[in-house]
Image (cartoon, helix red, strand yellow):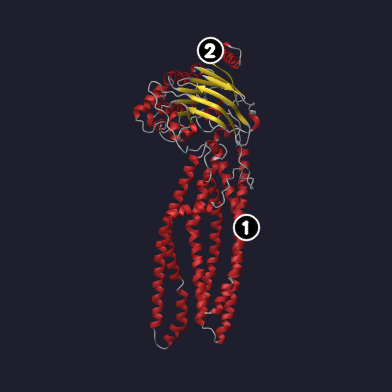
Amino acid sequence: MTTQLSGPPASSPGDGTGPAHTSGSAEDTAPPQLPAADDPFDKDALPAPPGATGSLLRSLLAPMRGRVAFAGLLLLLQQAAVQAGPLLVAYAIDRAVPAVRDGDHGPLIAVGVAFAVISLAASALQYVFIRVSARVNQDVLLDLRGRIFRQAQALSVDFHERYTSGRLISRATTDVESLRELLAEGLQELITVLLSFLYISAMLLWLDLGLGSVAVASFVPLYLLVRLYRRRAGRVFRRRSTAIAAVIVKFAETMNGIRPVQAFRRERANAAEFEVLNHHHERTNGDALLEMARYVIGSRLVANTAVAAIVLWGAYRVAGGTLALGVLAAAVLYLRRLYDPIDRLGMFLNSYQSAAASLEKIAGLLAQTPTVPEPEVPLSLPQLASEHPGRTVEFADVSFAYRTGGEILPRFDLTIPAGQTVAVVGSTGAGKSTLAKLLARFYDPSEGRVLLDGTDLRDLPVPELRRGVVMVTQEAFLFSGTVADNIAIGRPEADREEIERAAKAIGAHAFISALPDGYDTDVRKRGGRISAGQRQLVAFARALLADPAVLILDEATSSLDIPGERAVQQAMHTVLRGRTAVVIAHRLSTVEIADRVLVMADGRVVEDGSPSELIAATGHFADLHQAWRDSLVG
């Protein structure tokens, strides 16, 4: 065994450069925060790289290119059928009605039949379009939610230590819902408006060049109005997306911590903080509605002015005999059909700005890359003999600091021979859990290498590393499901007999058998149906079933009572025999099972030896051991 220490002193625990300890202890320092965004309510902004939003949308639609084209064709034909109506009105007024006066009812009957045919055709095409587009919409959302979930699982631990779960929930729910509204309603409105513009402009110019020119000229102020609305509404909807995310974060945080909230009477303070966030969300919603109101009022003013001018001019021309009455009627109908969707265009822009802001945030999340990547050329660990299940662990010239600075572990060398159980002790902030996280490869060292049987952890594919190195943390996390399901997470292919054998080895079989449905008992959310100590025993059984070569126990017995701790320690004597184990311990009773003890202070290993050797000496561990003995006597 070797331990070599060098390098400058570590930063103090209070410098704010370390991550929040995911197991629940305050072992390491607080995480570096992401840069603050323009909006003070979005402190964890993940800006999307240039072009990322468009690339994301194209990648979502690419597999459905054929169906999208078919839906576009359906809408094209449907609009052609709809826009034939005013032409039939013009024909009826100028041709069919005069023919009836002459006793010829054929043209009027033909107009009626034609109206019925185009109405049925428009309805049928609309029905098929809705079915096709709805399927496309749902497939896009299914793909997007899956991408968000897979990305959230793939990102490294340091990302989750600084980006709240509430914001991830917001990305997968409210932001995806914004895109759903755009795909379900907004895009159809946009395409309808664009097709109406093309059809109606062509028809108006064909019916009468003068009236058509006036109508087309009126599109210029409408275009300018749309550009202004897009620019102003874009900023508002980005703030609104941030505001609702802040509300979700606060709500989720409070509900997850409801016990300490009630225990420390935080209800009133939390309600006040939530009220601030809720009012901010209310204001951003109000700003969005105000922008929408300005657009609608402006567009209606332009539309009504244009219609009034065309009707007035057209009426004078009809009276002068230079324009047919049916043409004027058709022109007015076309104008109303054109300007009426302008309000719906505003609704599309509303949905578009909301979806664009949400898609930008989703693209920012999906653009993140794991700080602990898979190796480009993965290597495999050598096979282990069944009688020697442990592996040699080596920290070679390793140092570690967070990206924001502040060295946590100065450069050091450390070798743990295969099969050795090493206890790591020290005061809070000494760097014990950081050492364990480097071994579990939740982080990569800033310098140097962490080796397993001579192979750099960075060269191992993550699945193989996770099979070889298993970590049990202070806070045992159980998923909703049965006790057996939670133990089987360690090795999903294990049968019931193997699951029970692991539980018996760790001393959990008795309490599991006493549960209402035994191993088939649903532990419910976060394992709330059983005690903290029982959850820890299930977590131990899960780790033992995985049969790792290296087992890391990070304060893993701190939740157990004295009898439970003794039972676990007795089981560990058998289970850890031959395996390599690193035990992070505050309770010195846990150290009794160790072959070797490392005492850490300020990120350094200051003592290294067997428990008996260090107790006999006059160093840090001897003082800690004496203090522990005195506490037992007291």
Q: Position of residue 19 (x, y in %)?
A: 58, 33
Quadrant occupied by the C terminus: top right
Q: What's the amino acid at mark 1?
A: Arg
Asked which secondary structure carries label 2, the reply is helix
Residue topped by disc 1: 232
Q: Position of residue 188 (x, y in %)?
A: 48, 61
Image vertical order of residue 597 relative to residue 439, above or below = above
The disc, 1 or 2, on the residue closer to the chain's N-terminal end is: 1
The reply to whether callout 1 and callout 2 are in contact (CB within 8 Å) is no
Observer-nearest of 516 and 372: 372
Observer-nearest of 623 and 120: 623
**Quadrant of res 235:** bottom right
**Quadrant of res 137:** bottom left
Q: Residue furthest top?
A: 616
Q: What's the amino acid at mark 2?
A: Ser
Asked if one can make out residue 108 in the rendered structure from this viewpoint, the answer is: yes
At x 59% / y 51%, what residue is drawn? 240
In the rendered structure, find residue 548 and report the number of the disc placed on it: none
Residue topped by disc 2: 612
Q: How many marks?
A: 2
